[in-house]
Image (cartoon, rainbow, N blue to C red):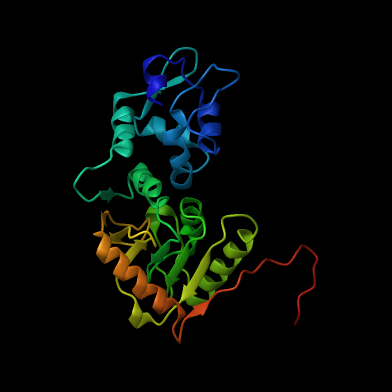
Amino acid sequence: MLWLAQTGPGMTAAEIDFVAASKFPIERDWNGGGLRGTSSLLMESLYPVVGPNASVYLLSAGFIGPAAQGTFKITEQGIALLRGTMRQSEGTNAVFKLDPEAPLDYIGLLSELDSLENPLVIDPYFHPYDLEAVVDAMPGVRLITVDRYVEKVEAFQKPKLKASLKQGQFEEILGRREVGDSVAEVIYVPAQELHDRYFLGANRKGYFAGGSFRSNKPTVVMELEPEHASDLYAHYETVATADGAKKLEPRTRPESGEQTEA
């Protein structure tokens, strides 16, 4: 993306949307070399948050602007965002400020979560509509949550779901993602076991979240000290396998015309 801002010919809206929805290495040729560079670094983290029409959001947010012949280039504001996602903090813990009115705020967090080994997500209010985005960022993730309803989230168009519908949504998503490398687990535990929200890894890395993923209100996600992350990971591994814990099973919808039992 930085290369495009300095010397590249720009990209059409269709090309931007294609790149945003694709998974590929950071260095890539477009049509034999017309576009090459670090454009995918931002884009491959963008898709889970913004969706397939990334060009519309990027333009409205001021991260890209018109160039020659119907193409677009990254703006100075876009360059600042990209540099922020690439910056590595030295000697200080990472802090991510998340605002539902600015979905691109989630890019740095989603990229960082990829570094968690055998990841755990702890969230008593996790909404099923977010499960696939989290699985994309953390393949093999285990979500530990509770058997209760979830509220409507206007900012990300997530409906209120009563407990039974919430469980059904989780099971259907697990069924869709059962094949391939992006297998996930959803584990219900007693409500008294959970309060705070965490993203934790077995490699002594973890983050504390002030609110649920993609909630209605701005929040902050802060990196934990290694010893705290390790202790919490061990604790919630025990919680996930203790009496009262229930692992949800993948479920697929019946094929069209298939008979179901009465």
Q: Residue at x 35, y 30 (%)?
A: 63
Judged left or right of residue 131, residue 121 is left
Q: Is residue 237 above or below residue 121?
A: below
The spot of residue 126 in percent (x, y) is 41, 66
Image quadrant where residue 88 sits: top left
The spot of residue 66 in percent (x, y) is 41, 19
Residue 162 visible to the viewer: no
Q: Residue at x 35, y 68 (%)?
A: 233
- Quadrant of the drawing holding the C terminus: bottom right
Q: Is residue 250 above or below residue 219?
A: below
Q: Residue at x 41, y 73 (%)?
A: 237
The spot of residue 56 in percent (x, y) is 45, 33
Task: Tell which of 112 and 203 is nearer to you.
Answer: 203
Judged left or right of residue 249, residue 152 is left
Q: Is residue 78 above or below residue 190?
A: above
The spot of residue 193 in percent (x, y) is 35, 80
Q: Is residue 247 above or below residue 35?
A: below
Residue 110 visible to the viewer: yes
Q: Residue at x 36, y 47 (%)?
A: 106
- Quadrant of the drawing holding the N terminus: top left
Judged left or right of residue 52, residue 236 is left
Image quadrant where residue 220 sits: bottom left
Image label count: 0
- Farthest residue to the bottom: give it: 243
